């Protein structure tokens, strides 16, 4: 009888240990990369972001389209999210490389040649290698970025924001900033 109790006690202990070590539900759903919409506008002090908060490159060339906003026709990604240029970028090389800058202004990344959608001049599309080794999409020689506070297609909340050394502007299909 005593050996049965010891055996049963061992089974219960093993089950408890297995339950404690087993997988549990995730503490948070970090969702998806460059197209994730932010919940709030940036504060004066940036907060640390999760690894998945950084934009992720897509398996094929990133598609660039033209979308309508209250500022007119602007460059957008395939989900309609507005793209920006940084006036401080004086060449195809991005100057937005600090963790804080990339948090608020994630670069538009790609793994292959970007694809021109309707209204986009394919001859103006290009890429540049970032300091971290990723490939950023350029248009008319300007690296392209998202703005963290744009929540949905057509949002242009980053227009004219002056931060990280210069102003940020939406990009027209001709490749010029809309100011």
Image (spheres, grey):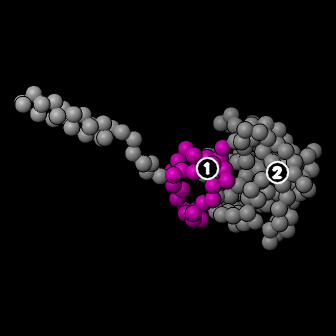
Is residue 12 rendered to the left or right of residue 116?
left
Q: Residue at x 54, y 56 (%)?
A: 46
Position in image of residue 75 (x %, y %): 82, 57
In the rendered image, which residue does mark 2 sit on?
64
In the rendered image, which residue does mark 1 sit on?
32
Q: Residue at x 53, y 47 (%)?
A: 50
Please state the total of marks drawn on the protein image.
Answer: 2
| Residue 81, quarter of the rendered image | bottom right
Residue 13, placed above or below residue 171: above
Label 1, residues with CA under 10 Å away: few <14, some 14-19, many ≥20: few
Q: Is residue 55 magenta?
A: yes
- Position of the N terminus by quadrant: top left
Q: Is residue 144 magenta?
A: no
Can you see residue 107? yes
Is residue 94 rendered to the left or right of residue 20?
right
Position in image of residue 119 (x %, y %): 91, 56
| Residue 8, quarter of the rendered image | top left
Separation of disc 1 and disc 2 at Cα? 19 Å
Magenta stretch, overall SS: loop
Q: Please, what secondary structure does the residue beneath circle 1 have? A: loop
| Residue 163, quarter of the rendered image | bottom right
Q: Which mark is residue 75?
A: none
Asked if the residue under mark 2 is in contact with the one under mark 1, i.e. CB atoms within 8 Å, the reply is no
Report the magenta residues as a range.
29-56
Q: Residue at x 30, y 36 (%)?
A: 18
Label 2, residues with CA under 10 Å away: few <14, some 14-19, many ≥20: many
Q: Please, what secondary structure does the residue beneath circle 2 have? A: strand
């Amino acid at each position: 009888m005593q050996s049965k109790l010891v055996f049963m006690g061992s089974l219960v202990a093993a089950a408890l240990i297995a339950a404690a070590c087993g997988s549990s539900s995730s503490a948070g759903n970090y969702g998806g990369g460059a197209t994730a919409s932010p919940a709030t506008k940036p504060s004066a002090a940036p907060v640390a972001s999760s690894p998945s908060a950084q934009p992720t490159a897509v398996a094929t060339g990133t598609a660039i389209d033209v979308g309508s906003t209250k500022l007119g026709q602007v460059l957008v990604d395939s989900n309609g999210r507005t793209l920006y240029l940084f006036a401080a970028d004086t060449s195809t090389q991005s100057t937005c490389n600090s963790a804080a800058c990339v948090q608020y202004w994630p670069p538009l990344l790609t793994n292959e040649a970007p694809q021109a959608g309707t209204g986009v001049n394919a001859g103006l599309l290009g890429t540049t290698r970032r300091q971290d080794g990723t490939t950023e999409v350029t248009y008319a020689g300007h690296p392209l970025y998202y703005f963290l506070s744009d929540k949905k297609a057509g949002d242009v909340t980053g227009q004219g924001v002056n931060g990280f050394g210069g102003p940020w502007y939406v990009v027209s299909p001709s490749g010029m900033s809309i100011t």
